[in-house]
Image (tube, rainbow, N blue to C red):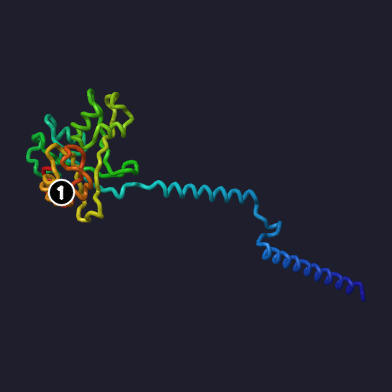
Amino acid sequence: MGEVGWRRKMIGGVGKKSGEEDDLKRRRFIRGVRSSGQPTHSHRLDPNMFRFELVLSFSLSIIFLRLTAVQSKCPKTCDLALGSYSVWLGTNLTFISTVSADSITDILGYNTYITNADSIDPGNRINLPFTCDCIDDEFLGHVFPYTVQSGDTYYEIAQTYYANLTTPAMLEQFNSYPASNVPVNAVLNVTVNCSCGDASVSKAYGLFVTYPLRVGDSLGSIAATADLSTDLLQSYNPGVDFSAGSGLVYIPGKAEVESKVFQGL
């Protein structure tokens, strides 16, 4: 055999042997993975990467649990609700417009029975329009801003200026000032409860009046004024004593006829 032939034989032999060894290594690797379920040393996961993925997965789980745990207790909100405001001696529509942040024109639009805007008899009720929002993801309400004047107290603001639509306790709860020290010119959050209805009672009513009870009110008298059955009215106010003389009830109506249905409430 010549020198060239000998070299070809050696090269071919080496190439063949090298290929067989590589193939054998591949087969051993595959068998090792199949039998152990783990990659060989050269294919193991980076420990730092594994810790990062574990921490990320844990963090995402915590975020998900917090998001699912913090849910609003408000079933829904509504763009329109009404507050029944009892006119007191010495007030007028200009003052009521100021504390309710409604224009006189808007107020008159929901009180078509008023024929003289400059003169409203004390004791009459007028309806104030406002949005019914979700307060602190806890309950339905609306917040009116009120600028404190010299001599104002929480009792006077709640019981007179806002005609018992709110309470002194709620003023103290939703403001940072104690009842004994309310600074002049401070802007208070006057929080008023409201309702957007209850589909389990009826789907026919889409507008509700927040109505502060007065001495002399009763389930029958309010139902008659609102042209509702006593059963329906009580269903929207479960457990409420309409003759208590204080507290709030919610009176249902239909938005397209609100001015007529709630006249005088």
**What x and y, as percent, mark residue 100?**
21, 37
Foreground residue among 14 and 72: 72
- Quarter of image, res 21: bottom right
Quadrant location, the N terminus? bottom right
**What x and y, as percent, mark residue 79?**
25, 47
129 to 181, vertically: above or below: below
**What x and y, as percent, mark residue 155?**
22, 29
Foreground residue among 155 and 130: 155
Question: Would residue 128 be seen by someone viewing this image from the given angle?
Answer: no
Element carrying mark 1 = helix
Quadrant location, the C terminus? top left
Residue 160 is left or right of residue 66, and the answer is left
Query: Looking at the image, which residue sits at the far bottom?
Result: 1
Q: How many marks?
A: 1
- Give the residue at x 20% y 35%: 164
- Give the residue at x 13% y 32%: 88
- Give the residue at x 22% y 56%: 203
The amino acid type of the residue labelled 1 equals Glu
Foreground residue among 159 and 53: 159
Residue 222 is left or right of residue 148, and the answer is left
Residue 251 is left or right of residue 41, and the answer is left
193 to 153, vertically: above or below: below
**Residue position for label 1:** 258
Q: Residues within 10 Å of mark 1 (few under 14, many from 20)?
A: many
Question: Would residue 194 be seen by someone viewing this image from the given angle?
Answer: yes
Query: Looking at the image, which residue sits at the far left?
Result: 115
**What x and y, as percent, mark residue 47?**
65, 50
- Give the residue at x 13% y 45%: 222
Foreground residue among 49 and 240: 240
Residue 234 is left or right of residue 24, and the answer is left
